[in-house]
Structure formats: C-alpha cells, structure tokens
Amino acid sequence: MGDPKKPKKKYETPRFPWRSDVLESEIRLLGEYGLRNKRELWRCKTMLSKFRGIARSLFGMPSSKRKILEAQLLNKLKRMGILSENAVLDDVLDLTVESILERRLQTLVFKKGLAKTIHQARQLIVHGHIAIDGRKVFSPGYLVLKDEEDKIEYAPTSPLNNPEHPIRVAIEVEAKGGA
C-alpha cells in the first residue's frame, strides 16, 4: 500500500527523450492541443499504449475468453468516442495519440466554438466557466464521453452565460470571419 500523499505516476517518460524527431513531434502536439507540459502528453501516450497492449494480448487468447474481453475493450473505446461504432479489434492498433487528445475537454470546447483559441479554452475550463450537463468541470484533461459531448456548455453561474458578454461577442465575430 502506497503513501496517500504520493499518488501513483500515470505516465511513462520517453525512452530516448533527446532525439530531435521526438522533441519536434512533442512540441508540435503541445502547441496544437494547448497542453501545459509534456506530462499531459505522456499521460495520453501511456493510456494509448495500455489500450494497444490489451489489444495485442487479446490476439493471443483462445476465442472463448477473447470475445468477452474484446467486447469490453471495444465498448469502452466506443463509449469514450475514440473508436467508431463499427470498429474492430484491429482498429485499436491503428489508434494514435491524437485520437485521445481529440477527446479532451479543452479540445472539444475549442472545436465547439466556446473559446477563441485552444489556450483560452483551457483558461475558461480552469476558471470554472465550462460545465458538462450543468456540472462544472475544472480539468482541461478530462476525457469527454461520446454522450456527454453535446452537453458541453457555459456554466449556469458563469458570467459567460450571458450572450452579450464581451468574450462571447468576440468569439462570435471571429467565428463569422471578422477580426
């Protein structure tokens, strides 16, 4: 049993952290998805690695046991919105880290047009202006489930809930192609 003050690490660092191609791809992803640091990226990479490892181990199992575990894995990934509804086990091996980064709340808030930039999306979430189904979420790295995706909105108690708020006006102007 571990110390409750020291939670278990949820990421693995790269094997060769100073390779230029690894550094360039990480920096590109950090900017594109507005991540705060590389730990957030490594957490997603580790999650992807675990999903892919489970899928690889399923290929070696007998078919009777494999069917149940395969259905569980595919249902989880479909519920999270990482895989499409008609996906098979081979599709799990084709996943990239971008498919997980696309499911983060920060990315979805930006794609939905609730924020001007990906960085503003992060700020709105951290400051408590974004809610999912009326419940405030303060974590930009929250992985949004497929059925929660259309419930993302401004928090009911947030001043941004008012359509005349200057930030919302600026966002709408930018969305129309102005400024």
Image: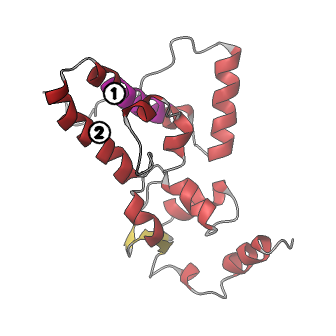
Marks 2/1 in contact by CB < 8 Å: the verdict is yes
Q: Is residue 49 something one can see in this rendering?
A: yes
Q: Residue 166 in the image: x percent, y percent?
A: 71, 80
* Coloring applied to the structure: secondary structure
Residue that numbered label 2 is attached to = 73
**Quadrant, the C terminus:** bottom right
Q: Residue 149 in the image: x percent, y percent?
A: 45, 64
42 shown above or below 168: above
22 shown above or below 103: above
- Name the foreground residue: 90 vs 31: 90
Secondary structure under the numbered disc 1 in the rendered image: helix
Secondary structure mainly formed by the magenta segment: helix
**Residue at screen point 64% across, 66% down:** 115
Using the image, tell me which numbered label, if any, was put on residue 55: 1
The image quarter in which residue 136 lies: bottom left
Task: Give the Cα distance between marks 2 and 1.
Answer: 8 Å
Q: Residue 154 in the image: x percent, y percent?
A: 51, 75
34 shown above or below 55: below
Based on the picture, tell me whether residue 48 belongs to the magenta stretch: yes
The image quarter in which residue 68 lies: top left
**Quadrant, the N terminus:** top left
**Amino acid bearing label 2:** Leu
- Name the foreground residue: 48 vs 11: 48
Secondary structure under the numbered disc 2 in the rendered image: helix
Q: Is residue 2 something one can see in this rendering?
A: no
Specify start and end residues of the magenta stretch as a single range: 42-54
